[in-house]
């Protein structure tokens, strides 16, 4: 189960980065093409805030989601062994105790 969640988080992080990067490039290509085609400085003044907001949103999702997924994967990987009982201090279930020694 944790392996499934970790692989899903890995996929979400890389997909978010890829889609945000593609949208970022497409948005800026459209903006540059519009400015060169119209040669209108008023267009730049009217749309700069909107393009800046969209670029910041795409930058936030493109970097923020993969970092959040990485943090979640790290926490899951660090916490999972304690839930599954894979600690080095815990003897196996079929161990027999003789005094202070563990035999198998």
Image (spheres, rainbow, N blue to C red):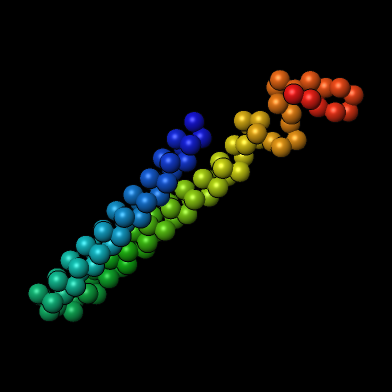
Give the percent coordinates (x, y) of residue 100.
88, 28
Q: Is residue 84 left or right of residue 35?
A: right
- Looking at this view, is 55 or 23 the one in front? 23
Determine which quarter of the picture holds residue 83.
top right
Determine which quarter of the picture holds residue 94.
top right
Residue at 44%, 55% (x, y): give it: 64
Residue at 79%, 25% (x, y): give it: 103
Residue at 66%, 30% (x, y): give it: 85
Examine the rendering and report whether any part of residue 50 can be seen. no
Give the percent coordinates (x, y) of residue 71.
53, 50
- Above/below status of 12 relative to 93: below
Give the percent coordinates (x, y) of residue 5.
46, 37
- Looking at this view, name the residue that lies furthest to the front: 104
Give the percent coordinates (x, y) of residue 101.
85, 28
Q: Is residue 50 left or right of residue 10?
A: left
Q: How many marks?
A: 0
Determine which quarter of the picture holds residue 33.
bottom left
- Above/below status of 31 relative to 94: below
Q: Quadrant of the C terminus?
A: top right
Examine the rendering and report whether any part of residue 77 can be seen. yes
Residue at 45%, 35% (x, y): give it: 4
- Looking at this view, is 25 or 43 the one in front? 25
- Above/below status of 50 relative to 10: below
Q: Is residue 87 left or right of residue 34?
A: right
- Above/below status of 21 relative to 38: above
Q: Is residue 53 left or right of residue 38?
A: right
């Amino acid at each position: 189960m944790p392996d499934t969640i970790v692989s899903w988080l890995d996929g979400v992080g890389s997909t978010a980065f890829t889609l945000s990067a593609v949208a970022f490039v497409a948005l800026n290509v459209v903006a540059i093409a519009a400015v060169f085609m119209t040669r209108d400085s008023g267009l730049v003044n009217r749309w700069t805030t909107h393009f800046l907001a969209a670029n910041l949103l795409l930058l936030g999702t493109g970097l923020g989601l993969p970092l959040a997924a990485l943090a979640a994967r790290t926490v899951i990987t660090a916490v999972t062994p304690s839930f599954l009982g894979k600690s080095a201090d815990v003897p196996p279930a079929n161990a027999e105790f003789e005094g202070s020694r563990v035999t198998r």
